[in-house]
Each structure stands twice: as structure tokens, then as C-alpha cells.
Amino acid sequence: MFDMDINQATISQHLSLLRKQKAVKSYRDGNNIIYEISNPKLIMACNIVREIVLDTLKKEADLSDLLP
């Protein structure tokens, strides 16, 4: 796991919204609640969006190299 500078309440609110929209499912494991992506296609969609954003940023950076 990695450390993000986000407070617990914010994460809980986001997970609650994702659960209501059926984007994630959850189950209890002792004192912990485990969340997982409900449909692997969501991961594929996120990867596609990430690629588009990275391509756009790269094109913008390439264009800025041409400016005086």
C-alpha cells in the first residue's frame, strides 16, 4: 500500500459514493472493510483515460518546445 495525504473522512465519503454507484463492492474481514472494483472494465476505462491525458500532455509539451 502507499501513503496518500488524504484524511479518513474524505476516503470514506468517496468509497461510499463508489459503492452506491456499484463501482466498488465491499465486504467485512474482521474489523476491516475490504473494497474491490466491481467490474474489471472500469480498470480498462481508467487506463484508457490515463493514456489520453498523457498523450495530450506530451503533445502540449512538444508544442511548447517550438515556441520562442
Image: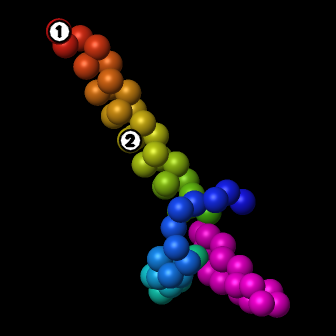
From mark 2 to mark 1, how far is it between C-alphas?
25 Å
Return the x and y of residue 48 as percentages of the image width and height.
Answer: 47, 47
- Dominant SS of magenta comes to strand
Return the x and y of residue 17 as percentages of the image width and height.
Answer: 45, 82
Q: How is the image coloured?
A: rainbow
Marked residue nearer the N-terminal end (2 or 1): 2
Q: Seen from this angle, which residue lies furthest right? A: 30
The residue shown at (55%, 78%) is 8
Q: Tell me the number on the disc at residue 68.
A: 1
SS for callout 2 = helix
Q: Is residue 26 magenta?
A: yes
The residue shown at (64%, 59%) is 3
Q: Is residue 43 left or right of residue 49?
A: right
Residue 31: quadrant of the picture: bottom right
Specify few, some or many for label 2: CA neighbours under 10 Å numbering under 14, 14-19, or 20 or more: few
Residue 15 visible to the viewer: no
Return the x and y of residue 15 as percentages of the image width and height.
Answer: 53, 78
Q: Is residue 23 magenta?
A: no
Q: Is residue 25 above or below residue 31?
A: above
Towards the viewer: 38 or 27: 27
Where does label 2 land, which residue?
53
Q: Nearer the viewer, mark 2 or mark 1?
A: 1
Q: In the image, which residues are magenta?
A: 25-39
Q: Is residue 6 left or right of residue 1?
A: left
The residue type indicated by label 2 comes to Val
The residue shown at (19%, 13%) is 67
SS for callout 1 = loop
The residue type indicated by label 1 comes to Pro
Specify few, some or many for label 1: CA neighbours under 10 Å numbering under 14, 14-19, or 20 or more: few
Q: Tell me the number on the disc at residue 30.
A: none
